[in-house]
Amino acid sequence: MNEDAFEVPERTEYRYLVQEEEEEEVQYVRHRHYISPVLVLSRRCIFLICLIVLALLVLATYLGYVAQTLPPGLAQVLTDCGEFRGRHKDGAFSFKGMPYAAPPVGDLRWAPPADPVCRSTLTDAGRFRSMCPQVRPLSITGKVMGQEDCLFINVWTPSLQPSAKLPVMVWIHGGYLHMLSGGETGYSPTEKLAADTEMVYVSFNYRLNAFGFMALEMLREGSPRNTS
């Protein structure tokens, strides 16, 4: 074997050149395809990032679904005057304290009911709102209770389906036109009553005493129906 030759790994192509004395030897070798470890690492990072993004999207979708799913015991409806969140218990739904007219204060104090002030946000309807101003007991020693902003309606229903076609009973509370309210304990309808009778019940507050029944000529003249 020529002393000027040298061994190279198998399957490696080369071209060997012998130059004149004192000149450098030049060897041409074609290497195998080379993949940078940095490139491999980058591909793995991209794959992991894609997995993380996908997992976050799935989590966001799940959280959005959970947020729209009401907890047990709550119910939500859309009306002409906004959305209301009520309660569900004893087999029926209830929506309490929903305004059916604008607060009768200021220029509306002795005026006919005006359209309610509707909200664009969700309103809680899980409790009775203020009763109308009244004195209890009905005597000079009684205590003044309630507020003028009191025109609220309450609904109890065993079904939220518009196609249910259930009978409706409207309860107008008593109290000599001087006291009580549409949410009076022991008198107003309940969820159990609505479930047991398969009926929709409605109650409401109305202005009492002088705020609702005072008869004055000046009020009659300013009334569109010619009545105080």
Image (cartoon, rainbow, N blue to C red):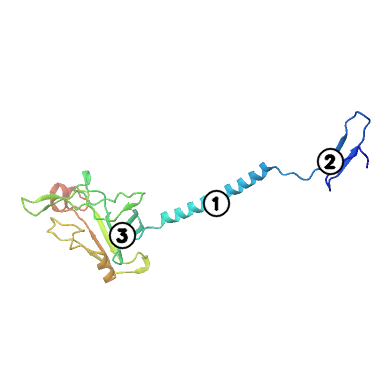
Choose between 7 and 203: the one closer to the eye.
7
Any mark on residue 29, and which?
2
Residues 132 and 33: in front is 33
Q: Earlier in the sequence, mark 1 or mark 3?
A: 1
The dot on residue 87 is 3
Q: Taking the image as drawn, is residue 83 in sight? A: yes
Place of residue 195 in the rendered image (x, y in percent of width and height, measured from the top left): 28, 69
| C-alpha distance separating marks 3 and 2 | 82 Å
Q: Are marks 1 and 2 in contact (CB under 8 Å)?
A: no
Which residue type carries mark 3? Arg
Instruction: Kindly identify the amino acid type of the residue bearing the numbered disc 2.
Output: Val
Q: Is residue 177 placed above or below 168 in the rendered structure?
A: above
On the image, which quarter does residue 125 sit in? bottom left
The amino acid type, in three-letter code, at marker 1 is: Leu
Residue named by callout 1: 54
User: Helix or strand or loop: what does disc 3 sit on?
Assistant: strand
Residue neighbourhood size for the residue with mark 2, other residues' Cα within 10 Å, grouped as few (<14), some (14–19), many (≥20): few
Task: Please name which of the two marks, 3 or 2, marks the residue nearer to the observer.
Answer: 2
Q: Position of residue 26 (x, y in %)?
A: 87, 35
How far is mark 1 from mark 2, CA to CA?
Answer: 46 Å
Q: Position of residue 36 (x, y in %)?
A: 70, 42
Image location (x, y in percent) of residue 104: 22, 48
Distance between mark 1 and mark 3 Cα atoms: 37 Å
Local packing at callout 1 (Cα closer than 10 Å; few below 14, some 14-19, many 20+) is: few
Q: Is 202 displayed left or right of 35 in the figure? A: left
- Point out the tag, 3 or 2, that comes first from the N-terminus: 2
Q: Secondary structure at mark 2?
A: strand
Farthest residue, direction top: 22
